[in-house]
Image: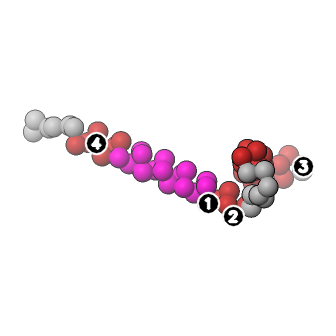
Amino acid sequence: MIELVVEELKDDIEAFLDFCHYRKREEGRHSDEKITRYEWLEAKRKELHSRIRNRRSGRSSARSGFRSVF
């Protein structure tokens, strides 16, 4: 039964651990400021959007370089 719950919550637990690691890194940089979950989500969102943009631009440049002989 516990295994089922752990499997179900696996993604949530992983996301929370990511947040904890991020908060520790950021507290080292900004020692007097508390990092909120909202700030972490905003940083994560920007990171993911940047990766999406990079992947899309990589695909479109690869397509534009292909010239069909047909």
Q: As displayed, is residue 46 above or below residue 62?
A: below
Assess disc 3: are there few (<14), some (14-19) or many (≥20) residues with their C-alpha within 10 Å of its C-alpha: few
The residue that mark 3 highlights is: 2
Residue type at tag 2: Tyr
How many numbered callouts?
A: 4
- For mark 3, give the secondary structure: helix
Looking at the rendering, the stretch of residues picked out in magenta corresponds to: 42-57
CB under 8 Å between discs 2 and 1? yes
The residue that mark 2 highlights is: 38
Residue 1 appears at what percent x and percent y? 89, 50
The residue that mark 1 highlights is: 42
The residue that mark 4 highlights is: 61
- Report the mark closest to the observer, 3 or 2: 2
Assess disc 4: are there few (<14), some (14-19) or many (≥20) residues with their C-alpha within 10 Å of its C-alpha: few
- Report the mark closest to the observer, 4 or 1: 1
Q: Magenta residues: mostly which secondary structure?
A: helix
Residue type at tag 4: Ser
